[in-house]
């Protein structure tokens, strides 16, 4: 069974600071996705990582994938309030179909 | 494009009542999924379908049934609702997977269901 663990689950950070969210998974996979969810809303795709060493950046967010370590990171640079949301990582197993989600990281950026 | 559309958006049921949630996608995706989201639990897969006429159980299938009679629609049924089924339900769809191609999932806006 594929297990996906995110940490931290809750994160309060000041504007302008940097931080990293970690996503570990338990079995081999080379498909890793990051989603953002605002309160009461649906999930919005942020990044798609499909190979070892993949790195994607969008604005203040950068995601990377290390398939050998079974680890993905979502790095936040110089946080702003608009980044406050819940971030999910999801892993697609090599022998399966559906994505397995972590429990999410609830991020609050304060002035 | 509408993408993935779920109906209804909100519903309150009494224990024992039945209902069907409808999911429709206009992206010609092969795969469709139903997830439920509960506080602190992330998203858990209820059932999924890899093509028209096929369905399979996910992580938490008990108390739910599904049907995929048409490629664009995926229905989730609750035959006898229980308070434990109070949740937010998300439908998603994705492309076929062949040898490692992207299976990024696109989500509907969710259905907030309360069972009293």
Image (cartoon, helix red, strand yellow):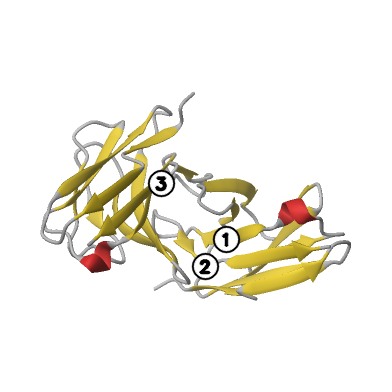
Side (left or right) of B93 relative to A107: left
Q: Which mark is residue A88?
A: 1
- Residue A91: give x, y in percent of width and height: 52, 61
Side (left or right) of A98 relative to B21: right
Q: Is residue A25 shown above or below A34?
A: below
- Residue B114: give x, y in percent of width and height: 29, 57
Assess disc 3: are there few (<14), some (14-19) or many (≥20) residues with their C-alpha within 10 Å of its C-alpha: many
Q: Which mark is residue B110?
A: 3
Structural distance between the alpha carbons of marks 3 and 1: 16 Å
Q: Is residue A3 shown above or below A74?
A: below
Q: Which mark is residue B78?
A: none
Q: Is residue A94 shown above or below B4?
A: below
Structural distance between the alpha carbons of marks 1 and 2: 6 Å
Q: Nearer the viewer, mark 3 or mark 2?
A: 3
* Chain under callout 1: A
Residue under label 2: A102
């Amino acid at each position: 069974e594929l297990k996906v663990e995110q940490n931290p689950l809750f994160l309060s950070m000041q504007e302008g600071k940097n931080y990293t969210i970690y996503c570990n998974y338990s079995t081999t996979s080379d498909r890793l996705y990051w989603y953002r969810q605002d309160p009461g809303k649906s999930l919005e795709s942020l990044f798609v990582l499909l190979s070892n060493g993949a790195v994607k950046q969008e604005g203040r967010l950068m995601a990377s994938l290390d398939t050998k370590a079974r680890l993905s990171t979502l790095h936040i640079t110089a946080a702003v309030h608009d980044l406050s949301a819940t971030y999910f990582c999801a892993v697609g197993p090599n022998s399966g179909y559906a994505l397995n989600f972590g429990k999410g990281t609830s991020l609050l950026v304060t002035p | 494009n509408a993408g993935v559309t779920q109906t209804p958006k909100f519903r309150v049921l009494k224990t024992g009542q039945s209902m069907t949630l409808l999911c429709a996608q206009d992206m010609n995706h092969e795969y469709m999924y139903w997830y439920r989201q509960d506080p602190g639990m992330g998203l858990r897969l209820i059932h999924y379908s890899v093509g028209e006429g096929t369905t399979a159980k996910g992580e938490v299938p008990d108390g739910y049934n599904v049907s995929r009679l048409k490629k664009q629609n995926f229905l989730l049924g609750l035959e006898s609702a229980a308070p434990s089924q109070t949740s937010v339900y998300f439908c998603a769809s994705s492309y076929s997977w062949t040898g490692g191609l992207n299976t990024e999932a696109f989500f509907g806006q969710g259905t907030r269901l309360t069972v009293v």
